[in-house]
């Protein structure tokens, strides 16, 4: 009997929705129990365990879970023995140093002898040691951004994405230390069977992600314009061309990048394309 791959997922928070969506879009149905602590699948050998994100690297390192989805920032901070199997591209953020807006900032020496509040002491310590800065690290687990305002610290080291939290707390970002995104981590000694399941999961995730931002385009064109139209469509290999029932006309199909969409549409019309249809793509497999 084949064993299930156990994957740890954040129970609630910023990673929960996107992690579950990725699994669903990979064609895996999860039936989540009432207490939402675990879930199993009937159509794929996978079980999900729901945990706080802080606990995910340890759980995977211990082998209680075989894999997990967590922010790279947590993986680096916890420094457990896990392997990053796939970068997932969502929950992008950075860990940065920020100081009160009114302070003059000329460089890292600002932090010499200062008190820095953070939930990421290991990453910060390593950075400060590398830069030979002596600073006092004050660990707090939540609402780090209010620390300078209430006199608890001179500066903070925390997650930044848009920067609006910093602005509303009268802080300015002065140094980016690491960039982070959600990653799929795995236990270093997975059995062959489990590695096989993980490979299948990664294959599915890649197919879903490849399709993101891509559209399928269908259009009609007079035969003598096929070459001009095809030149505008990069496609996966080359566009599919099929004759229409009406003589002298063909249908051309291809894949385009959503970002190029409006620019290409204008050019296609000019080149002689008609009846242009653009439809979403669910998965792309090479
Ligand atoms: P938990 O209760 O599980 O410990 P948490 O409060 O530590 O949750 P969340 O705020 O849910 O964590 O964030 C989870 C992860 O999402 C972070 O570790 C980080 O990788 C990423 N993240 C956090 N804030 C942002 C943001 N503003 N934009 C994008 N990604 C973010
Ligand atoms: Mg956490």
Image (spheres, grey):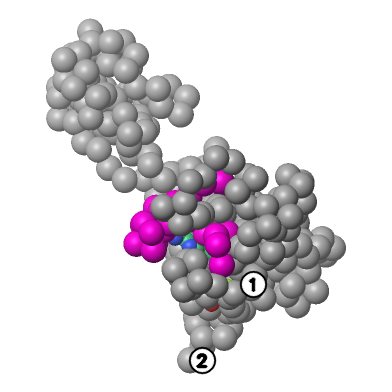
Residue 28 in the image: above or below residue 202: below
Residue shown at 48% from the left, 43% from the top: 210
Q: Is mark 1 within 8 Å of ligand 2?
A: no
Range covered by the magenta-colored residues: 153-176
Q: Is residue 57 visible?
A: yes
Quadrant housing residue 195: bottom right
Q: Position of residue 239 (x, y in %)?
A: 38, 24
Indicate the quadrant where residue 21 lies.
bottom left
**Percent coordinates x, y for residue 246 in the rendering:** 15, 22
Task: Tell me the residue at 19%/31% (across/down).
Answer: 276
Do tag 2 and tag 1 residues touch (Cβ < 8 Å)?
no
- Residue 4's quadrant in the figure? bottom right
Q: Secondary structure at mark 1?
A: strand
Q: Is residue 166 magenta?
A: yes
Label 2 CA crowd tier, 10 Å (few <14, some 14–19, many 20+)? few
- Whether the magenta-drawn stretch holds residue 229 is answered as no
Q: Quadrant of the C terminus?
A: top right
Numbered badge on residue 139: 1
Q: Name the side, left or right, on which 22 lies relative to 114.
A: left
Residue nearest the viewer, comparing 5 with 142: 142
Separation of residues labelled 2 and 1 (CA atoms): 32 Å
Q: Earlier in the sequence, mark 2 or mark 1?
A: 2
Q: Position of residue 268 (x, y in %)?
A: 22, 20
Front-lying residue, 10 or 2:
10
Name the one closer to the observer, 199 or 245: 199
Count of labels in the image: 2
């Amino acid at each position: 009997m084949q064993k299930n791959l156990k994957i740890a997922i954040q129970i609630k928070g910023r990673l929960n929705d996107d992690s579950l969506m990725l699994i669903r879009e990979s064609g895996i149905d999860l039936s989540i129990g009432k207490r939402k602590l675990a879930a199993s699948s009937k159509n794929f050998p996978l079980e999900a365990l729901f945990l706080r994100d802080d606990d995910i690297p340890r759980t995977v390192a211990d082998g209680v879970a075989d894999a997990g989805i967590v922010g790279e920032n947590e993986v680096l901070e916890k420094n457990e023995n896990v392997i990053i199997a796939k970068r997932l591209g969502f929950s992008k953020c950075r860990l940065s140093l920020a100081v009160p807006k009114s302070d003059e900032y000329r460089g890292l020496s600002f932090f010499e002898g200062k008190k820095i509040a953070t939930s990421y002491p290991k990453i910060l310590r390593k950075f400060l040691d590398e830069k030979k800065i002596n600073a006092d690290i004050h660990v707090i687990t939540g609402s780090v951004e209010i620390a300078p305002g209430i006199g608890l610290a001179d500066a903070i080291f925390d997650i930044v994405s848009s920067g609006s939290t910093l602005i509303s707390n009268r802080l300015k970002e002065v140094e980016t230390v690491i960039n982070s995104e959600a990653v799929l981590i795995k236990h270093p000694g997975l059995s062959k069977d489990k590695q096989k399941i993980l490979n299948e999961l990664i294959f599915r995730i890649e197919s879903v992600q490849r399709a993101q931002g891509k559209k399928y385009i269908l259009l009609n064109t007079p035969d003598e314009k096929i070459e001009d139209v095809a030149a505008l469509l990069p496609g996966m290999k080359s566009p599919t061309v099929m004759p229409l029932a009406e003589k002298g006309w063909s249908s051309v199909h291809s894949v385009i990048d959503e970002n190029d969409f409006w620019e290409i549409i204008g050019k296609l019309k000019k080149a002689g394309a008609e009846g242009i249809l653009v439809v979403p793509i669910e998965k792309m497999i090479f």
